[in-house]
Image (tube, coloured by chain):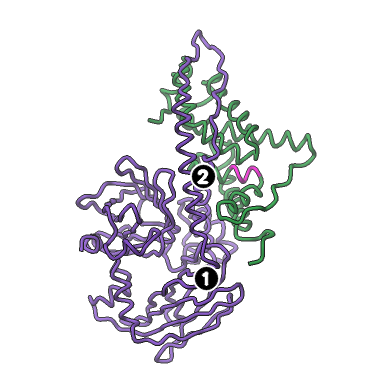
Chain colours: A green, B purple
């Protein structure tokens, strides 16, 4: 059973490591996969995931179960940390690394590479909506951005992904 | 409203929100906006499949180093072995998803086409490859009249498609097998009846240039318009003839995909819908049997949840998801849906179908009759 809400927060506040372990096992793989897509690097994704998991453990009062489940809080923290990482990297390198070259021809590879060509924030938003199933309202609360902004960014991200996915990119002639 | 103004509302509709009446009216008649909606649904499915297959590479995430707080310590029971087992299973399932996708891509370029009757605005569409069996559909031509079209792609190349086409006008008697077939309500017997409908029709051959409109003459002076495109990989075919808003007693599947736990069982070939006393659709999934989805309870069915383009249900300990490119039913969402599984497909289907296939739509009693015949 997936455990979340007030009871879980109370257990974390009491330092119940077993409850934290269960919470970690329930969500670690998916969070890490989300971050891997967002950041494009498995090692960094794991570091950010660890950092995000430590937040509710070290500061259990930081999340309000009435506002969002702990899982949403966790993904929200992770998304913000990942955005910080991108900003830090852009400052350090002057520009963000270019996306990978097109290699695949199978549908799964095409989608994976199309996704990699999106802006990181667009990638993150689409993933949280389509794969993790968060509603627009939940995303607004998780990411601390207005609901209207979530919707307009989702629309822009979908259109960008659609254009790339449908072939507005260099590809082999049929 | 025009397409540019409606585009953001397509995204909102995809998120399950209501949209202004003007935008909805535009979408009903705009194939480009409908294709946009269908692409969004398809992209979501692909992203979820990507998430499933990605687990193939997953390794054990390490638990963060927790510092002791308030005198408590992290126990040594970190449950690593169970986790490792989960990752291993994920890898196997992810691999099967990848293999299923690869198998689905063989067979040369795809030809996706729409057939329309300019007089009645009726439209059907299909997807085929060179050498596939006949495909096509029926277009409303008058109050009691239909135009039936059968299309076979003899050769599919980037800039030329050689087509063999059979066309006939029919006026099926109410309640006849012909009428049921033309309304996609016969399930597995449809092919047999449709073959009889076209048995004496001589096919005409056409060289079609993708992107152009081909006018196909029909007896009585009418014309059917064919438009299509060639794709190197299986495309997300236009579902413009599927309604975007359904009535609460209506059920519909278009360009569906079926997933059990994290195993992709395949895309469902064909689609359609029904509005009946207990509206139902059925799919045949080779090796897994038949699944019938109905809007009201019926004997032997278990309860699932329908929400826009998805149905979730649990059966025999397995979690299933059925995705559709367009909404599966209308009314308040999420809502209940009932699912019945038969261990086999109708007898005539078992040996010829290798991929999940749409069995038919109609009242649940008709579908069960097809299954148990």
- When the figure is inspected, residue B254 is found, relative to residue A35, above or below; the finding is below
Q: In which quarter of the image is the C terminus of chain B?
A: bottom left
Q: Quadrant of the N terminus of chain B?
A: bottom right
Q: Quickly name the residue at label 2.
A: B53
Stretch of the chain drawn in magenta: A120-124
Q: Residue A117 appears at what percent x and percent y? A: 66, 49
Q: State the residue at coordinates (58%, 75%).
A: B210
Q: Please state the chain letter of the residue tagged with numbered disc 2 in the rendered image.
A: B
Q: Please state the chain letter of the residue tagged with numbered disc 1 in the rendered image.
A: B
Neighbours of disc 2 within 10 Å: few (<14), some (14-19), many (20+):
many
Q: Residue B40 appears at what percent x and percent y? A: 52, 55
Front in this rendered view, residue B334 or B259: B259
Magenta stretch: includes residue B313: no
Q: Residue B58 appears at what percent x and percent y? A: 54, 36
Q: State the residue at coordinates (41%, 28%).
A: A3
Q: Quickly name the residue at label 1.
A: B111
Work out which residue is located at the far right of the displayed protein and give it.
A94
């Amino acid at each position: 059973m997936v455990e979340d809400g007030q009871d879980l927060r109370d257990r974390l506040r009491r330092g119940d490591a077993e409850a934290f372990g269960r919470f970690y096992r329930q969500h670690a793989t998916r969070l890490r996969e989300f971050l891997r897509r967002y950041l494009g690097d498995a090692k960094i994704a794991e570091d950010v995931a660890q950092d995000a998991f430590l937040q509710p453990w070290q500061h259990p009062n930081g999340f309000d179960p009435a506002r969002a489940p702990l899982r949403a809080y966790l993904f929200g923290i992770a998304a913000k940390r990942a955005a910080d990482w991108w900003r830090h990297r852009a400052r350090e390198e002057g520009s963000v690394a270019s996306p990978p070259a097109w290699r695949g021809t199978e549908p799964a590879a095409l989608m994976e590479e199309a996704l990699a060509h999106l802006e990181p924030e667009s990638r993150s938003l689409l993933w949280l909506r389509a794969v993790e199933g968060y509603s627009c309202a939940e995303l607004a609360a998780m990411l601390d951005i207005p609901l209207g902004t979530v919707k307009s960014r989702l629309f822009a991200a979908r259109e960008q992904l659609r254009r790339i996915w449908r072939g507005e990119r260099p590809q082999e002639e049929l | 409203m025009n397409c540019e103004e409606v585009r953001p509302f397509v995204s909102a509709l995809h998120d399950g929100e209501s949209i202004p009446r003007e935008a909805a009216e535009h979408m009903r008649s705009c194939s480009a906006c409908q294709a946009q909606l269908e692409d969004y649904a398809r992209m979501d499915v692909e992203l979820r499949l990507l998430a499933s297959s990605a687990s193939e590479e997953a390794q054990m995430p390490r638990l963060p180093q927790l510092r002791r707080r308030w005198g408590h310590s992290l126990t040594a029971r970190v449950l690593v072995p169970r986790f490792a087992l989960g990752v291993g299973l994920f890898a196997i399932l992810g691999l099967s998803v990848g293999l299923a996708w690869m198998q689905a891509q063989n067979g040369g370029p795809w030809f996706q086409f729409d057939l329309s009757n300019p007089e009645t605005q009726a439209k059907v569409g299909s997807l085929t490859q060179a050498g596939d069996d006949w495909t096509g559909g029926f277009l409303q031509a008058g109050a009691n009249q239909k135009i039936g079209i059968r299309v076979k792609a003899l050769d599919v190349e980037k800039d030329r498609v050689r087509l063999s086409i059979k066309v006939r006008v029919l006026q099926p008697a109410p309640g006849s097998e012909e009428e049921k077939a033309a309304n996609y309500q016969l399930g597995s017997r449809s092919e047999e009846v449709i073959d009889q409908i076209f048995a004496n029709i001589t096919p005409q051959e056409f060289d079609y240039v993708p992107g152009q409109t081909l006018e196909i003459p029909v007896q009585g002076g009418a014309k059917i318009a064919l438009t299509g495109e060639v794709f190197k990989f299986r495309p997300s075919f236009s579902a413009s003839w599927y309604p975007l808003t359904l009535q609460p007693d209506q059920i519909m599947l278009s360009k569906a995909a079926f997933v059990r736990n994290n195993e992709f069982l395949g895309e469902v070939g064909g689609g359609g819908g029904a509005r009946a006393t207990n509206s139902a659709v059925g799919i045949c999934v080779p090796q897994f049997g038949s699944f019938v989805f109905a809007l009201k309870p019926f004997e032997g069915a278990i309860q699932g949840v329908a929400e826009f383009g998805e149905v979730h249900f649990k059966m025999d300990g397995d979690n299933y998801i059925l995705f559709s490119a367009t909404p599966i039913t209308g009314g308040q969402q999420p809502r209940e849906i009932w699912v019945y599984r038969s261990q086999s497909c109708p007898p005539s289907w078992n040996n010829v179908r290798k991929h999940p296939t749409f069995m038919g739509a109609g009242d649940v009693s008709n579908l069960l009759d097809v299954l148990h015949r």
